[in-house]
Amino acid sequence: MPTAVAGPEIERLIQLLARLPGLGPRSARRAALHLIKKREALMTPLSSALQVAIEKIQVCNTCGNIDTQNPCTVCTDTRRDSSIIVVVADVADLWALERAHATNGFYHVLGATLSPLDGVGPQDLTIDALVQRALDPRVTEIILALNATVDGQTTAHYITDLLQDANVKVTRLAHGVPVGGELDYLDEGTLSAAMRQRTLF
């Protein structure tokens, strides 16, 4: 019968760390041990940063990004192109596009994608707010940067239908062969999408 190796406080720390994405029980134990060994250099500043985050982080009323100010840093950036709104499902997608410097437009975070099996309907997303933003005369293009999944594509079609009356061009991210990808390793869906959306060389 296994015996406890550490006190309940340490076990609680490990359990909480194990809830983070990408950390299983074993990785959580290693992370907890590392934090404990570097208490002054890591654990104290981390604890302080978490407390500040709890107090100051909020959701942007304009786009749905998370920040310590409202409207967020992206929405208050005057150097951005106000004619473009990039629609993403989650804040993580917004951050990924920003890391890649893929666009200079503004964003709109839906909060998820439509998923009838999971009980996520249009009322659970910020689609109405997106339609209102699309009616702004400065906006000329809505880029649907949604995942190439069934739920992502269903959401894209739903939004496209709602934006028919808005005077905007609705585009989506290209699908197909990734940069550096080898055809032999790609699945059939990716290959057929790439063939359908081929472009001039």
Image (cartoon, rainbow, N blue to C red):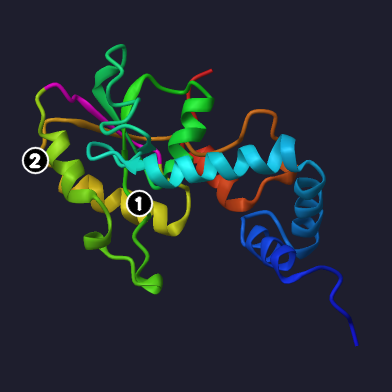
Q: Is residue 80 above or below residue 158?
A: above
Q: Determine the residue positioned at 40% across, 38% down.
A: 145
Q: Picture quarter containing residue 5?
A: bottom right
> Residue 60 falls in which quadrant of the image?
top left
Residue drawn at x 16%, y 35% is 134
- Please, which residue is most extreme toward the top here? 79
Q: Where does the image place residue 95, in percent across and percent down from the top left?
A: 48, 34
Q: Mark 1 or mark 2: name the one nearer the start of the chain.
A: 1
Q: Which residue is mark 1?
A: 111
Residue furthest out toward the right: 1
- Quarter of the C terminus within the rendering: top right
Identify which residue is drawn at 49% across, 39% down. Answer: 175
How many neighbours does mark 2 have within 10 angstroms: few (below 14), some (14-19), or many (20 or more)? few
Q: Which mark is residue 165?
A: 2
x, y percentage for residue 149? Answer: 47, 54
Q: In this picture, is 189 found above or below 172?
A: below
Q: What label does residue 155 carry, if any?
A: none
In what element is the residue under mark 2?
Answer: loop
Q: Amino acid at mark 2?
A: Asp
Tell me where the magenta segment starts and ends, as one range.
Answer: 138-145
